[in-house]
Image (cartoon, rainbow, N blue to C red):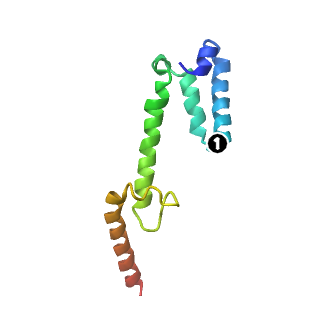
Amino acid sequence: MLLSSKLLPDIIWLTAPLAVALSIIGMQYTKTLHPPGGATALIAVSGSESIIDLGYLYVLFPVLSGVFVLLLVALIVNYMTSQRIYPSDGSFLGIFKWFTKPIRNQSKKIKHIRFNMKK
C-alpha cells in the first residue's frame, strides 16, 4: 500500500487530497508539474482493491511502463525528420541512429525535392 493509505487507511476524504497535494509539491519542487501526476496519485489512494493490492508495484507497472512507452514514441517521432531534434542536445541520437538515420535521409531527400520543385 502507498504511504498515505498506510498512515490513514480509512479516511479517504483526507488521504486523497493528501496524496494529490504531496504529488503536486513534489512536481513543483522538481519543476515537472504535470496534472496527470496528481490524478495518478489520486487513483493510487482511492482506486479499486486491485490497485490498492498492487501497492508500490502500481508505480512500476502501469505508470513507469507508460512513461517509457511515451518517451520512446517521443524520441522516435522527433528524430524522424531532420528539422526536429529532441532532446535539443542530441544525447539520445546515438541510441536510435539505426532507426532514425534512414528515415532522416529520406526526409532530407523529400525536402530537397520539394525545394527544387518550388523554383
- In-front residue for pair 92/49: 92
Local packing at callout 1 (Cα closer than 10 Å; few below 14, some 14-19, many 20+) is: few
Q: Quadrant of residue 28?
A: top right
Hey, which residue is sitting farthest bottom in the picture?
119
Which residue is identified by label 1? 30
Q: Nearer the viewer, residue 79 or 42?
A: 79
Q: Relative to residue 13, is residue 88 drawn left or right?
A: left
**What residue is drawn where x is 44% and y is 42%?**
68
Nearest the viewer among 73 and 43 is 73
Residue 66 lies, in percent from the top left, at 44, 38
Helix, strand or loop status at disc 1: loop
Compared across the picture, whether 13 is left or right of 71 comes to right
Q: How many numbered circles are shown?
A: 1
| Residue 14: image location, x then y, percent | 68, 19
Residue drawn at x 44%, y 54% is 75
For the C terminus, the quadrant is bottom left
Residue drawn at x 40%, y 55% is 76
Which residue is rendered at x = 55% and y = 31% of the image?
Answer: 40
Residue 53 image point, x, y percent: 47, 17
Q: Based on the displayed image, in which of its 4 quarters is residue 103 positioned?
A: bottom left
Q: Quadrant of residue 109?
A: bottom left
Q: Tag 1: residue type?
A: Thr
